[in-house]
Image (cartoon, rainbow, N blue to C red):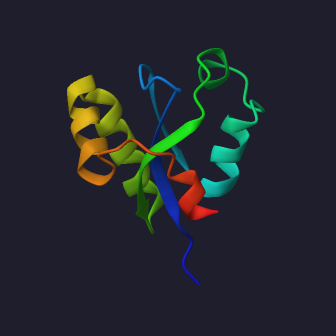
Amino acid sequence: MTKEYYIYIMTNKRNTVLYTGVTNDLIRRVYEHKSKLVEGFTKKYNINKLVYFEMYENPSEAIAREKQIKAGSRQKKINLINSMNLEWKDLYLEIV
């Protein structure tokens, strides 16, 4: 049985703020953000829409990819989101 790890990008209602994270349980983690159970940046800026994610079997690879995405420009993040989700719809509805 392989464990899965995810990097993800979330945004707010107006798509003006981007947040990148890593988790081993994407559904639970997005739910925590949506329900504002997580103190900090995502709660403060109403980050509640999953717009991009990638899956990995190795936690080190997922963490390295998260760091790579975080180090990139906003435009690179936008391009990444557009490559998977041109309409910026909430992907959480498709994974639950």
| 15 up-or-down from 21: above or below | above
Name which residue lies at 27% across and 33% down: 78
Residue occupying the far top of the picture: 44
Q: Dividing the image into 4 quarters, which one contains the N terminus?
A: bottom right
Task: Where is residue 95? Give x, y as percent.
Answer: 57, 63
* Relative horizontal placement of residue 25, taking residue 79 as reference (left or right): right
The reply to whether residue 95 is in sight is: yes
| Residue 3: quadrant of the picture | bottom right
Q: Dividing the image into 4 quarters, which one contains the C terminus?
A: bottom right
Task: Where is residue 52? Give x, y as percent.
Answer: 41, 47
| Residue 54: quadrant of the picture | bottom left
Name which residue lies at 51% across and 46% down: 90
| 60 up-or-down from 2: above or below | above
Residue occupying the far front of the picture: 87
Task: Where is residue 86? Give x, y as percent.
Answer: 29, 46
* Relative horizontal placement of residue 65, taking residue 35 as reference (left or right): left
* Front one among 23 and 80: 80
| 18 up-or-down from 51: above or below | above
